[in-house]
Image (cartoon, rainbow, N blue to C red):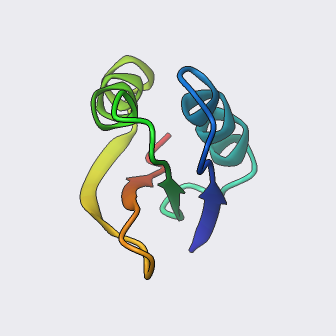
Amino acid sequence: MIEVDCRGKPCPLPVIALAAAVSDLAVGDVVSVVADDPAAAVDVQAWCRMKAQEYVGADTAEDGTPRYVVRRVS
């Protein structure tokens, strides 16, 4: 799994980083976005819906920062 560190980056930078990371993945691969911007919780899910990718869910990184997991499906 690839992890994209977006700590300290405001909206829309986490989603822009996610889009770039997904383009490098094979179908079925997973990427996680670690982001402390509260908007990322909504933005990552919205991006998945718009781009027809699978939002796997959220958990936390080792330091407690939210982490959003996405699987490339197309």
Q: Is residue 2 above or below residue 32?
A: below
Residue nearer the viewer, 31 or 52: 31
Q: Where does residue 2 sit, x and y in percent of width and height?
A: 63, 68
Picture residue at 49% right of the left edge, 48% below the top: 35
Q: Is residue 39 above or below residue 8?
A: above
Report the quarter where the N terminus lies.
bottom right
Q: Where does residue 29 sit, x and y in percent of width and height?
A: 53, 64
Q: Quadrant of residue 69?
A: bottom left
Q: Where does residue 42 sit, x and y in percent of width and height?
A: 28, 28
Q: Is residue 69 left or right of residue 26?
A: left
Q: Is residue 12 left or right of residue 17?
A: left
Q: Where does residue 23 sit, x and y in percent of width and height?
A: 71, 41
Picture residue at 34% right of the left edge, 34% below the top: 38
Residue nearer the viewer, 27 or 60: 60
Picture residue at 67% right of the left edge, 38% below the top: 17
Q: Is residue 24 left or right of residue 22?
A: right
Residue most extreme to the bottom: 62
Residue nearer the viewer, 12 or 38: 38
Q: Quadrant of residue 40?
A: top left
